[in-house]
Amino acid sequence: MKKTILVAGSTGNLGLRIVNTLAAKDVTVRVLVRSNCSAEKLNAFERLGAEICKVENWNIDEIKTHCIGVSCVVSVLAGLRDVVIDAQKVLLDAAIAASVPRFIPSDYSLDFTKFSYGENRNLDWRREFHEYLDKCPIAATSVFNGAFMELLLDEMPMIIFKKQIVIYWGRADYKWGFTTMDNTAEYTANVAIDDRSPRYLRIAGEVHKTISEITGSKFKFIRIGGQGLLGMFIKLGRFFSPGKNDLYPAWQGMQYMHNMIDERSKIEVLDNNRYSGINWKTVEVLLMENNFKNYK
Ligand SMILES: NC(=O)c1ccc[n+]([C@@H]2O[C@H](COP(=O)([O-])OP(=O)(O)OC[C@H]3O[C@@H](n4cnc5c(N)ncnc54)[C@H](OP(=O)(O)O)[C@@H]3O)[C@@H](O)[C@H]2O)c1
């Protein structure tokens, strides 16, 4: 019998990609959408052959009915504490109430298991959610993909192509973990149908090269400072622009950077090869596809 996979957060950037990948596999895809979901997105789900489950009120009883017969609930919710902890707990409790055996929490981040509370606000919420999840009678798998590679194109102010400079914190020879959103989605779709997936899986499209190897010698490297200075910037940023209701205030991006240049986020073993058929995109290819053809 075909497995049924339910995706919550299916209308989002990563969620939609996961639904797309699952739709091409031999599974039934159920998408959990809020009642205000646009007709455009509903039509897209219909075209993919997904079963659409509209939720009026995000509560256990209502979501439980959509979880009956599901073999894995994939959470791709994104938001502040009220989403990552509160809404995700409702989703998890509903899955358990419907006897769903497996759950994928909305992590898709660097591996925060070696970090402590206070080092990254957004990852703290995930950690707090894990504390609850790991006590629940359901098997869970987290996907750790480092940072989305696409952030290098604009949001992560690191490679300034026009000026041919690389601005960095920490060490220029540090090996980073970046994965494209599509690769993360493809991998997560495989995890969703893999009954034997372990608690944590770590992936990266590019770890074998440093940024200096990727960009080449023509780029000028400017080191701003180390973790100490970055820590001060974070404190100042948080003081002057708390952005409590913003999901990604500038200081939170700096917290992510602080974590990424930390030895504890170093990826020792990758699980990329657990599933075949994924064409892992490297930073170089992504840059070329985005018209930085002569970047070296
Ligand atoms: N590693 C990285 O570099 C990186 C970067 C960005 C994101 N991420 C992670 O990737 C995951 C997905 O992020 P994304 O950017 O794809 O998110 P997104 O596009 O903002 O989508 C968020 C999804 O969550 C749903 N949602 C939000 N609040 C909700 C609530 N209260 N109740 C129910 N559903 C709610 C939204 O539904 P509606 O459409 O109904 O609002 C939407 O489907 C998150 O875990 C995020 O933190 C990682």
Image: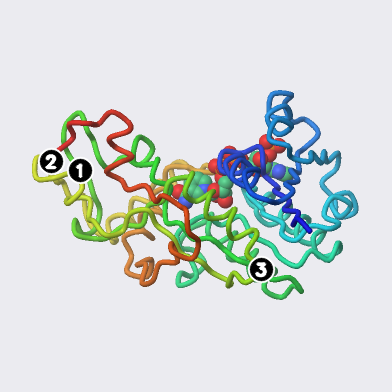
Q: Amino acid at mark 2?
A: Phe
Above or below: residue 201 compared with residue 280: below
Q: Amino acid at mark 3?
A: Asp
Q: Could you tell whether 294 is left or right of 11 in the image?
A: left
Q: Secondary structure at mark 1?
A: strand
Measuring 31% from the left and 46% from the top, which residue is drawn there?
Answer: 283
Residue receiving disc 1? 166
Do the numbered discs 2 and 1 sit on residues whose CB atoms are within 8 Å?
yes
Tell which residue pokes out farthest to the top in this image.
Answer: 40
Crowdedness of circle 3 by 10 Å Cα count: few (<14), some, many (20+)? Answer: few
Query: Does residue 167 appear in the picture of this structure?
Result: yes
Task: Please give the label number shown on residue 75.
Answer: none
Task: State which mark lies toward you, 1 or 3.
Answer: 3
Whether the residue carrying mark 2 lies under 8 Å from ligand 1 is answered with no
Say whether disc 3 or disc 2 marks the residue closer to the N-terminus: 3
Which quadrant is home to the N terminus?
bottom right
Residue 35 drawn at (x, y percent):
81, 34
Residue receiving disc 3? 195
The total of numbered circles placed on residues is 3
Quadrant of ligand 1 in image: top right
Say whether disc 1 or disc 3 marks the residue closer to the N-terminus: 1
Which quadrant is home to the C terminus?
top left
Q: Amino acid at mark 1?
A: Val
Q: CA distance from mark 2 to mark 1?
A: 7 Å
Above or below: residue 109 compared with residue 116: above
Residue receiving disc 2? 219
Measuring 82% from the left and 55% from the top, which residue is drawn there?
Answer: 67
Above or below: residue 134 compared with residue 71: below
Residue 43 drawn at (x, y percent):
72, 27
Q: Could you tell whether 54 is left or right of 140 in the image?
A: right
Q: CA distance from mark 1 to mark 3?
A: 42 Å
